[in-house]
Amino acid sequence: MAKRAFEKMMAGMEDAIAYANGDMSRGKVAMPSKGLDVAAIRKQTGKTQDQFARAFRLPIGTVRDWEQSRSQPDAPARVLLSLIQAEPETIEQLVQRA
């Protein structure tokens, strides 16, 4: 079993090296979705990071990480952020009722 795990790790390393050397068929890069500026969405609401996090029940650290590009919102978070961007007051009211 350990040999099989090692072989899988080595295959992954070989793919990574090939990709780094220009063989695009051996790897895949996940790119964050374009057009979702979390800081701009938050600023549109007129809220601080802390106020925004509380209003939409998000961890403050997560909001900071998104704004500083340390992490990207996952699919459900992107939906929530898009809704906030379109209708911030309505979404805040709905979140507070939930």
Image: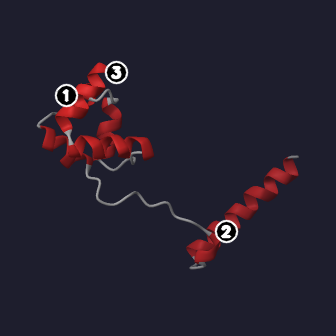
Q: CA distance from mark 3 to mark 1?
A: 18 Å
Residue receiving disc 3: 98
Residue farthest along the bottom direction in this orientation: 22
The amino acid type, in three-letter code, at marker 3 is Ala
Secondary element at image label 1: helix
Q: CA distance from mark 2 to mark 1?
A: 44 Å
In the rendered image, residue 26, in percent from the top left (x then y), is placed at 64, 72
Q: Tell me, for residue 35, which label it has, or none.
A: none
Residue receiving disc 2: 15
Q: Is residue 18 above or below residue 48?
A: below
In the rendered image, residue 70, in percent from the top left (x then y), is placed at 37, 47
Q: Are marks 3 and 2 in contact (CB under 8 Å)?
A: no
Q: Are marks 2 and 1 in contact (CB under 8 Å)?
A: no
Q: Which of 69 and 96 lies nearest the eye of the viewer?
A: 96
Secondary element at image label 3: loop
Q: Which of 15 and 32 lies nearest the eye of the viewer?
A: 32
- Kindly report which numbered mark, 3 or 1, lies closer to the viewer in this rendering: 3
Q: Are marks 3 and 1 in contact (CB under 8 Å)?
A: no
Residue receiving disc 1: 51
Which one is earlier in the sequence, the residue at label 2 or at label 1? Answer: 2
In the rendered image, residue 65, in percent from the top left (x then y), is placed at 34, 42
Q: What residue do we see at 30% from left, 26% from top?
A: 95
- Kindly report which numbered mark, 3 or 2, lies closer to the viewer in this rendering: 3
Q: Is residue 94 above or below residue 2?
A: above
Q: CA distance from mark 3 to mark 2?
A: 46 Å
Question: In the image, is 58 to the left or to the right of 52?
Answer: right
The amino acid type, in three-letter code, at marker 2 is Asp
* Color encoding of the figure: secondary structure
The crowding category of the residue bearing disc 1, from other C-alpha atoms within 10 Å (few below 14, some 14 to 19, many at least 20), is some
